[in-house]
Image (cartoon, grey):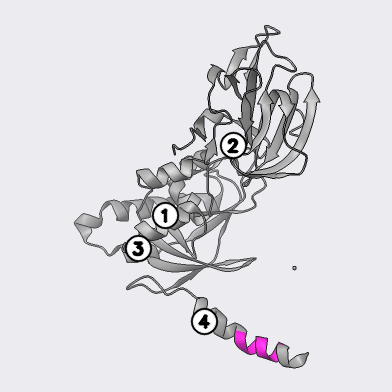
Amino acid sequence: MHRIPRIMKLSQALILLIPIMMFLYRPAPARGAESLELGFPRISRLDSRDPGFKQYLADVELARRRIFNLERTGEDPVAIAEALTIYAYTPQGTEDLLSLAARCTISYASLATLNRIAHPGSLANRGPLLLPSAPGLFIPDPPESDLEQLLASTRLNEPGITITLNRKEGKAYFRFIPGADFNPTERTFFLHTGFRYPLRNYRLTSRFGMRVNPVTGVLRNHNGLDLAAPQGTEVYAVQAGVVTEIGEDPIYGKYIIIRHGNNWVSLYGHLSKIDTVLRKPVESGSLIGRVGSTGQSTGPHLHFELRQNGKAQDPGKYLFQEGIR
């Protein structure tokens, strides 16, 4: 859409307590492994002429061969983890996690878990991305997201090594399991954003992608889904968020925009009625409006869009029916 639009005695006590607290909350290394503290050599561009990237690819290939030959050589996987190097690279333009993983010949699970990325999408404005020289899973301590909680609970007994990353916000601790990849359940959590459908009953009349506009007859990209339903059908927020825009547009008619976490926004167009207010926090499944035919429309339906970092995404890849994940 074009408008997608923080007394001296107290101080002394704290000074004495801080080192003790840091010691108590520092996670213990994985069983049989030492803690490894890492720095970040830089990669300027993903080009074989870049010395940093050339060395990175060589390191990845060596690690992949060692992992592939584990059964034959009998090498301890922890030895592979101890040889880990982590590089830093700032994504350019519209690079996304999946395409970047392919160029780096590393699994997207490795990149996602090390960088604590909950879902795939654009990497614009993220700042430096960390690139591991060996494939595997990086489980943070403590875990926070649903995916991290899942990994921490199901990978408890797998051999690994605790690594320490120095970040601007402080030290971060991960347990690195070399050679591991997402299992089907973990992959589902990663690829799924947890957006519900905005209607409980509907008929899909137009998908995301190129189509001939039914009103103008012009071939152009359709940035969302059209979901036909009777006039006045209830429209629900697809995920918790905040209403950031309400208005009326010649194309979208009466519309609502909700901002969600991880730079996602959802748009609901052609409404007959708006049942929410600007800057209101909403929960997943909150009633926000009613289906209509306002704006450029040939009949009652909901035009629904999902955007991340300002870029339209195919909603069909991210929505689930109520009660189904």
Instruction: Please state which of the two labelled residues, at mark 1 or mark 2, is closer to the viewer.
Output: 2
Residue at left 36%, top 72%?
33
Question: What is the crowding at mark 1: few (fewer than 14 residues within 10 Å), some, or many (at least 20)?
Answer: some
- What amino acid type is highlighted by mark number 3? Leu
Query: Label 4 to label 2, Cα distance in Å?
Result: 42 Å
In the picture as drawn, the residue positioned furthest to the left comes out as 72
Residue at left 75%, top 68%?
6
Q: Name the residue carrying label 4.
A: 23
Q: Which residues are magenta?
A: 11-17
Q: Name the residue carrying label 1.
A: 150
Kindly check if marks 1 and 3 are in contact, taking CB atoms under 8 A apart as contact: no
Question: What is the crowding at mark 4: few (fewer than 14 residues within 10 Å), some, or many (at least 20)?
Answer: few
**With 313 as the anchor, is 28 left or right in this view?**
left
- What amino acid type is highlighted by mark number 2? Val
Q: Name the residue carrying label 2.
A: 238
Q: Compare marks 4 and 2 and give the one earlier in the sequence.
A: 4
Q: Is residue 12 magenta?
A: yes
Q: Secondary structure at mark 1?
A: helix
**With 111 as the anchor, is 82 left or right in this view?**
left
Where does the image place residue 228, in percent across and percent down from the top left? 59, 17
Where does the image place residue 154, in percent across and percent down from the top left? 35, 57
Q: Quadrant of the C terminus?
A: top left
Instruction: Please state which of the two labelled residues, at mark 3 or mark 2, is closer to the viewer.
Output: 2
**Image height check: is 41 above or below 94?**
below
Q: Is residue 193 magenta?
A: no
Query: Label 3 to label 2, Cα distance in Å?
Result: 33 Å
Where does the image place residue 77, in percent across and percent down from the top left? 31, 62
Instruction: Please state which of the two labelled residues, at mark 4 or mark 2, is closer to the viewer.
Output: 2
Q: Quadrant of residue 270?
A: top right
**With 127 as the anchor, is 57 left or right in this view?**
left
In the picture as drawn, the residue positioned furthest to the bottom comes out as 9
- What amino acid type is highlighted by mark number 4? Phe
